[in-house]
């Protein structure tokens, strides 16, 4: 039910894109969260960071475009798979009961067909990349199709989301350089800690319903210890990002960007009100700007 999809508790779907879509397409627009792009951004940023850090000046525009489209396509496919697997749980949760599969607005076989089309598009994009990136992209499917099951067996599905959503750091570095190196690995690790933080905040929206229906999350495991946990994982994320930049010989603007990220992490960890779903959602969405700040810092560092 989590998966960084961004929906307001209890609110039915119906953003501007869905409202303007033809009636037959409305369930498909809702299914892939087209009106809720934060999940796409969170999937995209680690790849963009790696493409920029691996560059000697401006990042390769062709690769940025491919990764941008790929993030949209694969996040959409992931949402569909997540909803197929979780449709019975989603029907019992206020925030997710309006989803097309949970509400019965769309049949499973139609969702499966749509997912197959998206996966085909993702493969077409992947085949434009270096062979090492292709291998890594195919390997990521194991994470994509395993993650939605984790909330049934562990209180830490957020860790598996981190492994999945930040795979683009490895993929981007491989696409840009044809190799893997320590800066990419540290970007990936830093992204995992970042995801542990933001998706724990996100999970606090559903903790009461999750407890009732037997779904696990880090929010339930941590409870009132969440703030200390956020401080710890965000600190670890910053250390990994800083080491990645240092090993890649990033110039000083990188650290300006990282300083902005530090301020945003501190604000999230210290100001979040874990018992107010609307505040959790707002803090979660603010991670868009974490990605922007770090990307801008990396690009500026490479350009100068």
Image: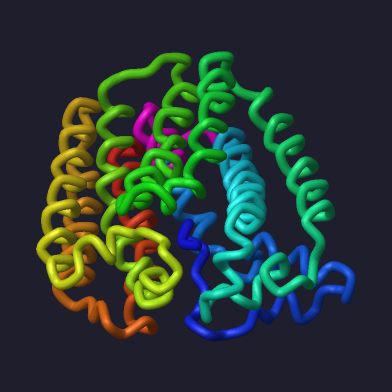
Q: Nearer the viewer, residue 268 or 275?
A: 275
Boundaries of the magenta span: 47-60
In the rendered image, residue 114, in percent from the top left (x then y), is placed at 79, 50
Counting every numbered tag in the picture gives 0
Question: Is 258 on the left or on the right of 46, as rendered?
Answer: left
Residue that appears at 34% across and 48% down: 154
Tell whether position 59 is magenta: yes
Q: Residue at x 35, y 52 (%)?
A: 158
Q: Residue at x 37, y 67 (%)?
A: 202
Residue closer to the observer: 23 or 58: 23
What kind of colouring is applied to the model shown? rainbow
Estimate the x, y position of residue 233 in percent, counting from the top left.
18, 52
Can residue 289 be seen?
yes
Q: Residue at x 45, y 54 (%)?
A: 42
Task: Answer whether residue 281 is visible to the viewer in this image.
Answer: no
- Measuring from the top left, give residue 198's x and y in whole percent: 32, 61
Relative image position of residue 58 (x, y in whole percent): 44, 36
Report which quarter residue 34 is drawn in. Answer: bottom right
* Depth order, front residue of 191/84: 84
Q: Is residue 126 magenta?
A: no
Q: Is residue 123 left or right of residue 147?
A: right
Position of residue 217 in the picture relative to residue 82 (left or right): left
- Which image quadrant for residue 203? bottom left
Camera-side residue: 278 or 72? 278
Q: Which quadrant holds the C terminus?
A: top left
């Amino acid at each position: 039910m989590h998966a960084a999809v961004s929906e307001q508790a209890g609110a039915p779907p119906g953003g501007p894109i869905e409202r303007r879509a033809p009636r037959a397409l409305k369930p498909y627009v809702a299914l892939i969260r087209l009106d809720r792009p934060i999940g796409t951004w969170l999937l995209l940023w680690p790849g963009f960071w790696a493409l920029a850090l691996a560059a000697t000046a401006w990042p390769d525009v062709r690769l940025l475009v491919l990764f941008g489209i790929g993030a949209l396509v694969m996040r959409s496919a992931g949402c569909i798979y997540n909803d197929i697997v979780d449709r019975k749980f989603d029907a019992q949760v206020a925030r997710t009961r309006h989803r097309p599969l949970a509400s019965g607005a769309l049949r499973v076989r139609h969702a499966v067909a749509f997912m197959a089309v998206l996966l085909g598009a993702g493969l077409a994009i992947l085949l434009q990349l270096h062979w090492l990136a292709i291998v890594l992209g195919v390997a990521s499917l194991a994470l994509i199709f395993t993650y939605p099951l984790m909330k049934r067996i562990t209180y830490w599905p957020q860790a598996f989301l981190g492994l999945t959503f930040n795979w683009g750091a490895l993929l981007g570095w491989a696409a840009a350089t044809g190799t893997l190196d320590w800066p990419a690995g540290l970007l990936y690790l830093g992204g995992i800690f970042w995801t542990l933080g933001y998706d724990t905040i996100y999970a606090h929206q559903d903790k009461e319903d999750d407890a009732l229906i037997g779904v696990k999350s880090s929010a339930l495991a941590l409870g009132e210890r969440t703030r200390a946990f956020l401080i710890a994982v965000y600190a670890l994320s910053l250390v990994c990002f800083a080491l990645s930049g240092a090993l890649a010989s990033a110039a000083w603007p990188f650290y300006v960007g990282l300083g902005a990220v530090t301020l945003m992490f501190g604000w999230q960890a210290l100001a979040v009100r874990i018992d107010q779903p609307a505040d959790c959602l707002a803090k979660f969405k603010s991670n868009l700007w974490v990605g922007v700040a770090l990307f801008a810092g990396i690009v500026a560092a490479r350009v100068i």
